[in-house]
Image (cartoon, rainbow, N blue to C red):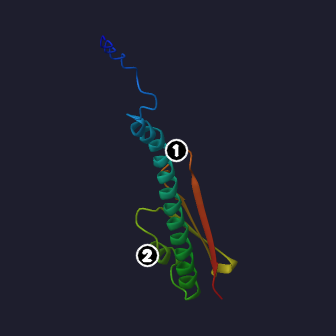
Amino acid sequence: MSRPEPHAPLPRSPRRGDQRGTSTLEVAGIAPVFLLVTLVLLYCGFAFYGITATQTAARQAARAASLGEDPSAAAADAMPDWLPHTVSTFHGGTGVRVTTNLPDLLPGTDLLVSRDAVMP
């Protein structure tokens, strides 16, 4: 009896479901979205800080005006040095409005903040 001939190995075909490189593509696709979300969150925090600082400056300036002191100096002491602002009074000098324009961190984001405070 003769021996059956051994079968020749089949040529290798590319494997279906080869996962090499998919994680690189996933990171490349998600990275810009993650960066944009991070920048928006940072700008929101920056804007919240600017609004809070402006409100505090308005309160301090109104307090100073009610005591007969200079409201502009009180607002300047309360505001961070890097944040330019203007101070105006109303209600016969007892009300104060502090206005600032937050610097643009993201293109097209011009945020003008104005806060009023009145002391009796």
Instruction: Indicate left or right for 70 with 82 as reference.
Output: right
Disc marking residue 73: none
Give the residue type that dot 1 points to. Answer: Pro
Q: Position of residue 55 (x, y in %)?
A: 56, 73
Total marks in image: 2
Instruction: Indicate left or right for 66 with 83 as reference.
Output: right
| Residue sitting nearer the eye, 15 or 28 | 15
Considering the image in quadrants, where does the C terminus appear? bottom right
Secondary structure category for the residue under label 1: loop
What's the CA distance linking mark 2 and mark 1? Answer: 30 Å
Q: Position of residue 74 (x, y in %)?
A: 48, 78
| Residue sitting nearer the eye, 42 or 52 | 42
| Residue sitting nearer the eye, 98 or 8 | 8
| Nearer mark to the viewer, of 2 and 1 | 1
Give the residue type that dot 2 points to. Answer: Asp
Q: Residue at x 48, y 52 (%)?
A: 39
| Residue sitting nearer the eye, 56 or 62 | 56
Considering the image in quadrants, where does the N terminus appear? top left
Q: Please rate how many residues cluster around mark 2, counting C-alpha atoms within 10 Å: few if below 14, some from 14 to 19, many from 20.
A: few
Compared with residue 4, is residue 22 higher up or lower down, i.e. above or below?
below
Compared with residue 3, is residue 65 higher up or lower down, i.e. above or below?
below
Residue under label 1, please give it. 107
Q: Position of residue 79 (x, y in %)?
A: 46, 71
Compared with residue 73, is residue 102 higher up or lower down, i.e. above or below?
above
Q: Position of residue 69 (x, y in %)?
A: 51, 84
Secondary structure category for the residue under label 2: helix
Residue under label 2, please give it. 77
Q: Residue at x 56, y 49 (%)?
A: 109
Q: Residues at badges 2 and 1 in contact (C-beta under 8 Å)?
A: no
Q: Please rate how many residues cluster around mark 1, counting C-alpha atoms within 10 Å: few if below 14, some from 14 to 19, many from 20.
A: few
